[in-house]
Image (cartoon, rainbow, N blue to C red):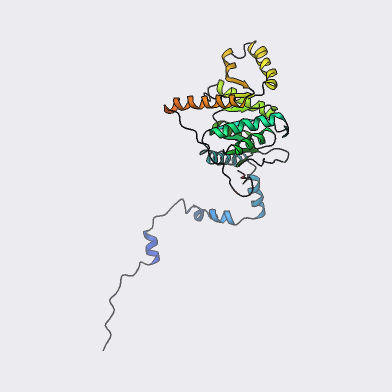
Amino acid sequence: MPKRPRQPRNRPAHRSERDQAMQPNPTLNRAVRTGQPTQDEKLFTWCEPQREQAAAFTHSEPWRVLRIMGEFVEGFDELAPLGPAVTVFGSARVPADDPMYDLCRETARELAETGFAIITGGGPGLMEAANRGAVEGGAVSVGCNIELPHEQGINPYVTVPLNFRYFFVRKTMFVKYAIGFVIFPGGFGTLDELFEALTLIQTGKIHNFPVILVGSAYWQGLLDWIRGAILAEGKIEERELTLLSVTDDPHEVRRLVVEHYERECHRKFGRILPLKPPAARQRGSGRNGNRDI
């Protein structure tokens, strides 16, 4: 029986016909038109001079801006869900057998048991004492470490570690995610944080932000100088002295922080939001789960 002839099918258009139907893309075709390699070729195929040039770019200002941006993004991402927190400052040079270490530890524990996370610089001394009290009180214990010329370590009581290259990014985290500062005796770094907080309040950048100095004997000389020199010469106003509170009592620190928190709740929400002590969380591996941002 003779085979029936096949019916012709609609075959796809020849490649040249399809090409004729396509619209030119001047952006994607730029490399072809100019005889330059594509961006993928540039990314994956380079010679040693190009490699050196690329490495040099990582030390340039545009790349530094991206690194700074990355630190802000990582810091915001990590601390945004933190909840109410208090930043505690103090000297890294105070040993564990110093009475001020115990006072700082007890103060942080009381704040933690009340429901506040604790933020510190993550170092030794009074920073360690505060992080230790946070862990003992069942709260999140944040340590914001900073790159310094000498070798850095993070204390073993930090449960949320963050690393920073830039002081101003780190300082932003201290202020942005805290409802107040509790400041123990310390050196230039502690004083820097103290006066920066006062400046931000004085200039209206932050509002209703308690700054509590712990250790009245240590701070008295500074307070006398502020009153006897700065205020006496009209460099500040009398009312600005009220931005500071001074105490030696952990219960008083807790009372001042809670009162501020409740006032802010009423101002923002019309009611007091209950404080719930958060469970300390661990990230990464090891005791600290250290993250370098």
* Residue 8 sits in quarter: bottom left
Closer-to-camera residue (93/25): 93
Seen at 59% across and 22% down, the residue is 198
Closer-to-camera residue (251/212): 251
Residue 104 image point, x, y percent: 65, 30
Image vertical order of residue 24 relative to residue 75, above or below: below
Seen at 69% across and 31% down, the residue is 101
Residue 215 image point, x, y percent: 67, 23
* Residue 121 sits in quarter: top right
Closer-to-camera residue (113/207): 113
Closer-to-camera residue (130/240): 130
Image vertical order of residue 184 relative to residue 79, above or below: above
Q: Is residue 142 visible?
A: no
Residue 60 image point, x, y percent: 63, 41
Figure quadrant of the C terminus: top right
Query: How many numbered dots are placed on residues in this image?
Result: 0
Seen at 38% across and 60% down, the residue is 20
Position of 21 with respect to 228 (left or right) is: left
